[in-house]
Structures are given as structure tokens and as C-alpha cells.
Image (tube, helix red, strand yellow):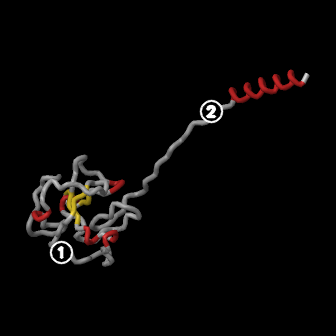
Amino acid sequence: MSKGIALAFATLTIGLLCCAPSAQAQISINIGVEPVCPYGYFDYPPYSCAPYGYYGPDWFSGGVFIGAGRWFHGPANFSGHVDNRFDPRHGYKGPLPGRGAEPFNHFQGNEARDGKGHVVKAAHEASNEHALPGYKGGGHSEQHR
């Protein structure tokens, strides 16, 4: 009799497991809202505003920052210069931008990055980049727009 009960229990268990409703896996990725910063933001968390001069002119199209990191919306083969002396990961401890900050026109790029934050070989020399967004003198070619 115990073998019959065991067989009935096993059959009932298998039957219940086969009839159990399946659950659909739901994956949701929320990257949040792109930071609103006057001169762009760093390409790593917590995505703090970058100071004026960190990003070169390549990172702007029509005076608008093309994004970096998870919000990058430039071309696939993009490379643009940055001045990593303004990067807190490289020891920068100076002020971050504020409204009405005095702009300057002395960009000195020393590193090229793709839109996702990887250091890459630049498509051109940073020494030719002089005019940052908002600067009305000098110029930069429109080759990256």
C-alpha cells in the first residue's frame, strides 16, 4: 500500500508542476534623465557637471553638448578631445561650473575619448581646437557635425 501511495503522490506532484502557470520575465532598464549642465558632464557616475574647458569643441554641435557615457548621441566612430586636468579622477579639485561663469578660449586637449568614455586615438590634433561653445572669436572646422 505504501508503494501505491508513493506512486500516487509522485504522479500528483508531477501533474501539479506541469500545470503551474509560467511567469514572464520582465526586464526594465532605467538610465534616468540626462544631466543638464552648461559645459557637459563627466562620462562616469555620478555624472557631475564638467567645468568649462574639459570638453573640446568636438563635443558640441550647434553649441549643444552631444552627450557622454550612457547619454552619448554622437556618431558611431566619434573621437573628441578632453583636457583631463579638469577631471576629478586625475586630481582636479577646482570649482565646477556655475551660471554666469566667465568663459575662456584656451582649450588645451591632452586626451581623446569616444562618446562612451574610452580613451582612443584622435582623428585630428587637439592643437587646432581653439573656440569653445559660446566663444565668438576664432573658429573650429565643422568636420564633426
138 vs 124, nearest the viewer: 124
Which residue occupies the extreme right position in the image? 1
The amino acid type, in three-letter code, at marker 2 is Ser
Residue at coordinates 51% horizontally, 44% vertically from top-left? 27
Q: Tell me the element at label 1.
A: loop
Which residue occupies the extreme left position in the image? 138
38 vs 128, nearest the viewer: 128
Q: Position of residue 99 (x, y in %)?
A: 30, 75
Q: Tell me the element at label 2.
A: loop
Q: Position of residue 68 (x, y in %)?
A: 31, 57
Residue at coordinates 27% horizontally, 71% vertically from top-left? 86
Q: Above or below — where is 5 with respect to 53?
A: above
Q: Position of residue 56 (x, y in %)?
A: 20, 64
Q: On the rendered structure, is 128 left or right of 12? A: left
Q: Position of residue 14 (x, y in %)?
A: 73, 26
Crowding at mark 1 (Cα within 10 Å: few <14, some 14-19, many 20+): few
Crowding at mark 2 (Cα within 10 Å: few <14, some 14-19, many 20+): few
Residue at coordinates 16% horizontally, 53% vertically from top-left? 144
79 vs 29, nearest the viewer: 79
The amino acid type, in three-letter code, at marker 1 is Phe
Q: Quadrant of the N terminus?
A: top right
Q: Above or below — where is 77 with respect to 127?
A: above
Mark 2 sits on what residue? 22
- Image quadrant of residue 69? bottom left
Mark 1 sits on what residue? 104
- Image quadrant of residue 51? bottom left
Residue at coordinates 40% horizontally, 57% vertically from top-left? 33
CA separation in Å, label 2 and label 1: 61 Å
The tag earlier along the polypeptide, 2 or 1, is 2
